[in-house]
Amino acid sequence: MAMFVLVVDTSIMNVSISAVVEDIGTTVSGVQGAIALEALVSAAFILIGGKVGDLIGRKRAYVIGLLCYAAGAAAMTLAQSLLPIIVFWAVIGGLGASMLLPSMQSLIHGNFEGKAQTRVYAMVGASAAIAAAVGPLIGGVITTFLSWRVSFLLEALVIVVVLSGIRLVRDVPYTGPRRIDVVGSILSVLGMGGVVIGILVWQEGGEAVGILIAVGLVGLGSLAYWLVRRKRLGKPTLIDPALFVSKLFRLGITGQLLQQIALGGTMIVLPIYLQMVLGYNALFAGLSIAPLSLSMFVVAMLVGRRAGSRRPANLILSGFALLTLGLVILLPVVPRADSGWWLFAPLVVAGTGLGLLVSQLNNYTLSPISNERVSEAAGVNSAAGSFGLSFGLAFAGAIMLAVLSLTFTSMTNASEVLPSDDKEQVAQVLQEDAEIMSDALLVDLLADEPEEISDEIVRINTEARPIALQIALLIPLVAALLGLLNGFRMRRQPDPKANGAAEGMLLG
């Protein structure tokens, strides 16, 4: 139940963007920023969250993580502005996720043995896949017929149910070294945070973007140097750099990162396209995206059970190939589609590819890791996935809004219908408002304008947004292509040997 809430939370937020924007009077980029920030915080602090669980107790860290998530859900239920969403849902909820995932893995591993442990891990993985599949539908139905706030209220109630049974969970003591790598922890947050925060600042039109991204890159480079140096001196490290000696682990982490960038970029662009361009409400947006998540779930379940003697590297390569094909088909569809049905075939193809990746990547990554270090390796794996997701969300969203702004300005200045004195004002209004409304709402807004002026502004709006969406879709497409190249490198390596402890870390 906890894993279900963890995964379904962002899905609900994605399909509710327009409803949240309208209800609290904010912007699409603001809500996008909150979504990306939540994923970023969980990625930046997940390694630290695992160490916190070691020090204060895994069960206590699990409870604190759930309470943080409940605070975020409650804030969404009551929020009247963007600020509490950023503080409670994105930051505090992200910190909760960073403690919840590592402690969940440790508690399951310590509370169950043998076949029972395998069954529990399978149930947790299945709940994650189901949440990814039904999240957009749940969010769409509740947002359309009740309110987006009800979705988050239900999340909080589920967490209350989970906490009511916490006495059944036995704590799992940590017997390893208790010293903390403070510098490594700071560098990990600085590195991953700097890159994505720089993109978010760019998305909001802020300054010093290059400096922020540079700080992030220097932070990541410094983290790598620090870890290697500490290891040589025999001192505790946030991450054991020896993990990366395994080429299979490096290739798997890279694949995980690229898969999540592609998924994050796709899942931020499509809901905006459906709600702002086609004018869909949350329900129809969720139904239109469902082929992606449902095909991903079905394929992951089938291949997970029936992979047989097929090489994991071949399945991963096929997954990236199908993901790339689906996104390539989607690109020319965007400016021509007049309903969500146009997206059905490419989303099924892309979802099938993602299903193959979900079924294989985690096991491929963790199999070469020894049993005593698999928990740490799983933390790195989760961090790579969360960072990739936040990067995809932030970068695709930033590219879309930047292109939208440039296109509005360019087309407005080139117009022969709009009066010269009004062009700057029209471009500014389109940049600020048109991204959050459908053409029908824009027509209502322009009801008092002369017909030729109104028609021209609607034309600019109609033509500009598909261009921006197409260019934004290039972000997940490039990630899929890089994943395809990484897949060919995987094929040249020997197959990983199965690791029972690693299988226990497959949380979807």
Image (cartoon, helix red, strand yellow):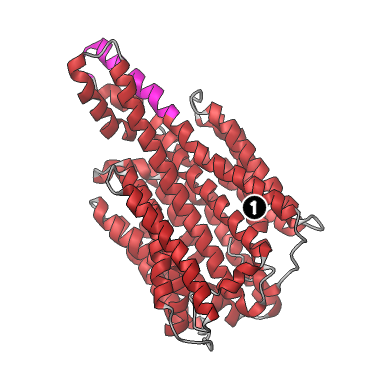
- Residue bounds of the magenta highlight: 447-467
Query: Where residue 451 sits: x, y (%)?
Result: 26, 11
Q: Is residue 172 magenta?
A: no
Above or below residue 316? Residue 123 is below
What crowding class fits label 1: few (fewer than 14 Cα within 10 Å), some (14-19), or many (20 or more)? many
**Type of amino acid at the residue the image marks with label 1:** Leu
Name the residue carrying label 1.
357
Q: Nearer the viewer, residue 288 or 101?
A: 101
Can the viewer see residue 195? yes
Residue in the image at 43% along x and 66% along y: 188
**Where does residue 13 sit, x and y in percent of width and height?**
40, 50
Q: Main secondary structure of the magenta part?
A: helix
Residue drawn at x 24%, y 29% is 428
The x, y position of residue 484, in whole percent, is 65, 46
Q: Position of residue 453 (x, y in %)?
A: 25, 14
**Relative vertical location of residue 149 with respect to residue 322 in this rendering, above or below:** below
